[in-house]
Each structure stands twice: as structure tokens, then as C-alpha cells.
């Protein structure tokens, strides 16, 4: 009989904290969703993959924020890997841990409170498609 | 741009000025040397006086609630900007 490994509950809590920290900024959520929608193995260009068409940010400003603030956070959790010259990003070994959180929201979009859906392009689209 | 990110941009620009390069050409990521979320939160504090100093490769940076950004003892950004070269 297989011996059950003791569960490290603290490690699980830390993992969830890292996941939500990685998703705690719009450009980082955009990167995760862009990769999930194309393919995590595919390298996407930055800043485009972090810049939703609905709230286009100055590319130079976003580039600075990505390099100095946003990219090191999901990279530290192995959720994404980035490349320089030109700047790009693709899914890392733990990409699924962050992707599953945002993808779950899309699958239960009718249960998401309106105030979190309105203004969020992907959730609005998902709800519109589900309503058809 | 998130208004609270303005300070982050100012810090990066100040370091780029000292390094004589474009902001995106700096050879390090600020986040590897200081918690950038903490900078955002400090910037969002109204009516609070604070100072934050941290080391990055080859430089010491001090940021103040009045907007001054000091790199290696020279005020690079702020109302009383001095010569960025630090010459006296």
C-alpha cells in the first residue's frame, strides 16, 4: 500500500498567495489570458500581449512597468518566462497555476457579480456568448 | 498609466539619466532590488511624510514624499533639481 505523503498545508497557502500576487495587476492578468488564448508554449510580443485594446496604454510606459515591476513577479513563480530584444513572454512550467484561476472565471461568468464583469472585456464577451 | 505608477516611472527615468541610457535599457529590474508594490502604496498615501532608500547596482537611491528622487546624493528629480552629474 502506498504511504500517503504528509500534506504541507503551509506550502499550499504560500502557493495560493503567490498565484494571487502574480494576478494582482491588470498587465499581468492580460499576459496570462493572452498566453492561455493562444498557446502557453508560443512566444508573444510585449508590450502588446499585456495591452488590451480597450485600454491602450502608452507602449513605452507599459514597457518600463513590465520590465521593472510586472514581469519579475510571475517569472519568480515560474508562471511565465520572458525574453529580451525583442521583449517577449511565454508560459513557464507553472503556467497552469495562474491560468486556471482566470479560466475558471470565464466558465462561471454568469455567477460573477456584475461590477466585476462590466468593463472587463473578456468577461463581458464570455457572458454575451453564453447568453446567446 | 495608473497614477500611483508615476513615481515608479520617475525613479526609472532618474536612474536612466544617471546611467545615460533610455529607461528600458537599464541593465537591471527595479523589482529585484525594491518592492515596487511598496513604492506604489507609498505614492498613494496622501498627507504622509516618508522617505525610502534602497541600493541598486552601482547606485544608492533615496525617494521622498515631496517628490524628490536622489541618486548618489544628487537630486535627479524634484522641485529643486540639481546637476544630474553630481558636480559641486
Image (cartoon, grey):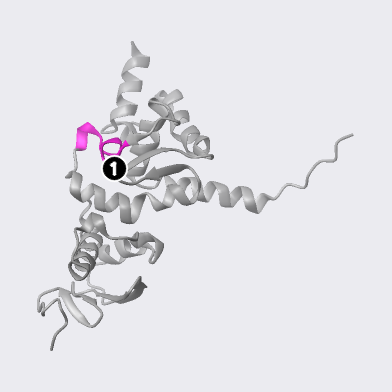
Residue at image mark 1: A86
Classify 10 Å Cα crowding around label 1: few (below 14), some (14-19), many (20 and above): few
Image quarter of residue B61: bottom left
Image quarter of residue B74: bottom left
Compared with A106, A15 (above or below) is: below
Residue toward you, A85 or A22:
A85
Q: Position of residue A68 (x, y in %)?
A: 32, 56
Tell me which residue sits at (44%, 42%) in the image: A80
- Outermost residue toward the bottom in this view: B88
* Residue range of the region highlighted in magenta in the rendering: A45-55
Tell me which residue sits at (35%, 47%) in the image: A25
Tell me which residue sits at (24%, 63%) in the image: B12
Q: Which chain is mark 1 on?
A: A
Q: Position of residue B7 (x, y in %)?
A: 22, 63
Report if residue A32 lies within the magenta region. no
- Outermost residue toward the top in this view: A132
Compared with A27, A126 (above or below) is: above
The answer to whether residue A21 of the structure is visible from this angle is no
Q: Position of residue B10 (x, y in %)?
A: 20, 64
Tell me which residue sits at (32%, 28%) in the image: A122
Image quarter of residue B38: bottom left
Image quadrant where one finds the C terminus of chain B: bottom left
The answer to whether residue A125 of the structure is visible from this angle is yes
Report if residue A51 lies within the magenta region. yes
Compared with B54, A104 (above or below) is: above
Say what secondary structure mark 1 lies in.
Answer: loop
Q: Is residue B58 left or right of residue B81?
A: right
Residue toward you, A83 or B9:
A83
Q: Position of residue B34 (x, y in %)?
A: 38, 66
Residue toward you, B21 or A74:
B21
Amino acid at each position: 500500500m502506498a504511504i500517503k505523503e504528509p500534506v504541507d498545508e503551509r506550502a499550499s497557502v504560500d502557493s495560493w498567495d503567490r498565484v494571487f500576487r502574480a494576478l494582482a495587476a491588470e498587465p499581468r492578468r492580460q499576459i496570462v489570458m493572452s498566453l492561455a488564448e493562444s498557446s502557453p508554449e508560443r512566444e508573444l510580443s510585449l508590450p502588446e500581449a499585456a495591452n488590451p485594446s480597450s485600454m491602450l496604454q502608452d507602449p513605452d510606459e507599459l514597457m518600463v512597468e513590465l520590465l521593472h515591476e510586472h514581469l519579475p513577479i510571475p517569472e519568480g513563480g515560474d508562471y511565465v518566462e520572458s525574453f529580451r530584444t525583442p521583449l517577449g513572454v511565454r508560459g513557464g512550467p507553472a503556467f497552469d497555476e495562474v491560468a486556471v484561476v482566470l479560466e475558471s472565471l470565464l466558465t462561471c461568468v454568469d455567477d460573477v457579480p456584475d461590477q466585476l464583469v462590466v468593463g472587463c472585456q473578456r468577461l463581458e464577451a464570455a457572458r454575451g456568448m453564453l447568453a446567446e | 498609466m495608473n497614477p500611483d505608477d508615476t513615481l515608479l516611472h520617475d525613479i526609472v527615468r532618474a536612474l536612466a539619466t544617471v546611467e545615460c541610457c533610455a529607461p528600458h535599457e537599464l541593465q537591471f529590474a527595479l523589482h529585484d532590488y525594491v518592492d515596487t508594490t511598496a513604492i506604489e502604496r507609498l505614492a498613494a498615501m496622501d498627507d504622509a511624510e516618508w522617505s525610502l532608500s534602497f541600493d541598486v547596482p552601482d547606485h544608492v537611491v533615496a525617494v521622498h514624499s515631496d517628490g524628490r528622487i536622489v541618486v548618489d546624493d544628487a537630486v535627479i528629480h524634484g522641485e529643486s533639481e540639481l546637476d544630474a552629474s553630481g558636480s559641486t
